Image (spheres, rainbow, N blue to C red):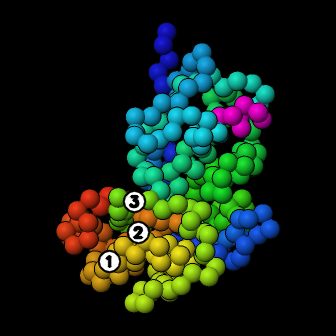
Amino acid sequence: MITPPQTWTAPAKVNLTLKVLGKRDDGFHDLESLMAPLDLGDCLHFEKSEGYSLHCETPGVPLDESNLVTMAVRAFETQCGKSCDWKITLEKNVPHGAGLGGGSSDAATTLLALNDLEETGFSQGELASMAAVLGSDVPFFIYRQVCEIGGRGERVQPVQVPGLAGTRMLLLKPGFGVSTPDAYKNCLNAQALPGVDYAAQKMPWGEIVNDLEKPVFYKHRFLAEMKVWLRSQPEAEAVMMSGSGSTMMVFLSQPEHAEVLLGRARQALDPSLWGEVVTIC
């Protein structure tokens, strides 16, 4: 009897706040961030096999040992002391280089799935420790809920933010991505562009702010133009870049007008803009 593949969803995230506190001795930066999972996500299909293999039809996704899914499998194998023989098919829905944590979520979801499929019984904390070795955003996705993040991303504390769950927003991303290392390279002394408002914006449940907007906008001027234009639109309650970019989050005064705004943005800014209406989980 052939067992059908088991499917796990790897949710995307947004950084509602991202404050860079300083550079660490290990080359990373100390951060304070409020991160939230979305109802948008990749899918990973696990099928028992005679050996491990990774498959993905999305062009440009590496299928070698550099893929975070494969790195997660190897880290898990090291911890449990046995081979994990699964054929994993990765179905990409989260754009690459978008600041939405697609690859990090894929890695964390792989750890969660293998813990269940291999019946290894690792605790949430143990999985988060494995995740921290893979990347700064990966531990957050072990918890899959709104969290405050500290350190370089390894300190994760689930929190309750009244009124946040169910918030809908429009995500907009141009055809290019942003390198996370590049975004952090000059983040502590980046220059502000004239005419761009980087200040925190108040929301009913708190405020949003992103210290990486200055360095990213300085290098990618189109993103600055996007933010200025979007903030001038009547449907936009607040606008900010997520994470290291290049996705812009638009909080809507009337969520039902998202498609109208998306169409206008494609006409005014870039006809190839990727857009998606998402909900904070």
How far is the residue under mark 2 from the one under mark 1? Answer: 9 Å
Q: Pointer 1: what residue?
A: 230
Q: Is residue 74 above or below residue 212?
A: above
| Circle 2: element type | strand
User: What is the magenta range?
Assistant: 73-79
How far is the residue under mark 1 from the one under mark 3? Answer: 18 Å
Q: Position of residue 175 (x, y in %)?
A: 35, 58
The amino acid on which the numbered mark 2 sits, given as a three-letter code, is Met
Label annotation for residue 176:
3
Quarter residue 156 falls in: bottom right
How far is the residue under mark 2 from the one under mark 3? Answer: 12 Å
| Relative to 238, 28 lies left or right | right
- Asked if residue 179 is among those painted magenta in the image, a careful observer would answer no
- Asked if residue 75 is among those painted magenta in the image, a careful observer would answer yes
Quarter residue 246 falls in: bottom left
Q: Position of residue 265 (x, y in %)?
A: 25, 70
Q: Position of residue 67 (x, y in %)?
A: 57, 40
Q: Pointer 2: what residue?
A: 248
Q: Does the residue at mark 2 contact the one at mark 3 (Cβ under 8 Å)? A: no
For image coordinates 51% across by 46% down, the residue present is 10
Whether residue 49 is visible to the viewer of this picture, yes or no, is yes
| Relative to 260, 238 lies left or right | right
Q: Does the residue at mark 2 contact the one at mark 1 (Cβ under 8 Å)? A: yes
